[in-house]
Image (cartoon, rainbow, N blue to C red):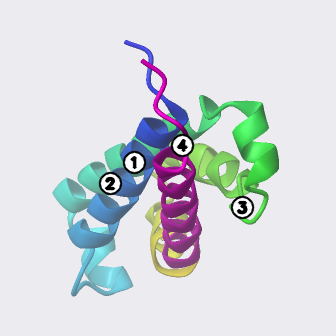
């Protein structure tokens, strides 16, 4: 199935929101000690990073306020945690320090694309 840029951004935002929700109320030590939450968080972050790779280049160029390179950082941290299970701290840092601003920028991009779509003439 081929997704529109807006649908891709929506998937990214939902995945980031899930990662945030999974870790709500936790501190670093609780996160380190809870394998189920780590796996759920890693899966959500991995989904966001993979879908971000598929956002068309022209959309990325128009929305340069989205720190697209952070998705590469997420992909790296997720790969280390998923395959080596050695670095929950880097995932925790992403969730607590990078994710809030990243989510805000993706939500801004969604609103912009929604506005653009609502102003497009209907051609039928």
- Residue 62 covered by magenta stretch: no
Between the C-alphas of marks 1 and 2, the distance is 6 Å
CB-based contact (under 8 Å), mark 1 and mark 2: yes
Between the C-alphas of marks 1 and 3, the distance is 16 Å
Judging by the rendered image, the residue that carries numbered circle 4 is 49
Mark number for residue 67? 3
Tell which residue pokes out farthest to the top in this image: 1
Relative depth, front residue between 87 and 77: 77
Q: Position of residue 51 (x, y in %)?
A: 50, 35
CB-based contact (under 8 Å), mark 3 and mark 2: no
Judging by the rendered image, the residue that carries numbered circle 1 is 10
**Residue drawn 44% across and 16% down?**
2
- Check disc 4: other Cα within 10 Å, few if <14, some if 14-19, many if 20+: many
CB-based contact (under 8 Å), mark 3 and mark 4: no
Residue 79 seen from this side: yes
Q: Which quadrant of the structure image shows residue 17?
A: bottom left
Query: Which structural element holds mark 3?
Result: loop
Vertical arrangement, residue 86 with respect to residue 58, above or below: below
Viewer-nearest of discs 4 and 1? 1
Query: Which structural element holds mark 4?
Result: helix
**Residue drawn 38% across and 43% down?**
11
Query: Which structural element holds mark 2?
Result: helix
Query: Is the N terminus in the top left, top right, bottom left or bottom right quadrant?
Result: top left
């Amino acid at each position: 199935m081929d997704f529109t840029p807006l649908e891709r951004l929506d998937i990214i935002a939902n995945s980031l929101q899930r990662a945030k929700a999974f870790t709500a109320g936790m501190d670093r030590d609780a996160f380190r000690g809870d394998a189920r939450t780590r796996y759920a968080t890693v899966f959500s972050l991995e989904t966001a990073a993979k879908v971000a790779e598929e956002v068309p280049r022209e959309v990325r160029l128009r929305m340069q306020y989205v720190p697209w390179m952070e998705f590469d950082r997420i992909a790296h941290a997720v790969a280390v945690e998923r395959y080596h299970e050695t670095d929950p701290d880097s995932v925790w840092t992403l969730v607590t320090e990078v994710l809030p601003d990243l989510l805000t920028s993706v939500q801004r991009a969604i609103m912009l694309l929604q506005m653009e779509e609502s102003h497009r003439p209907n051609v039928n």
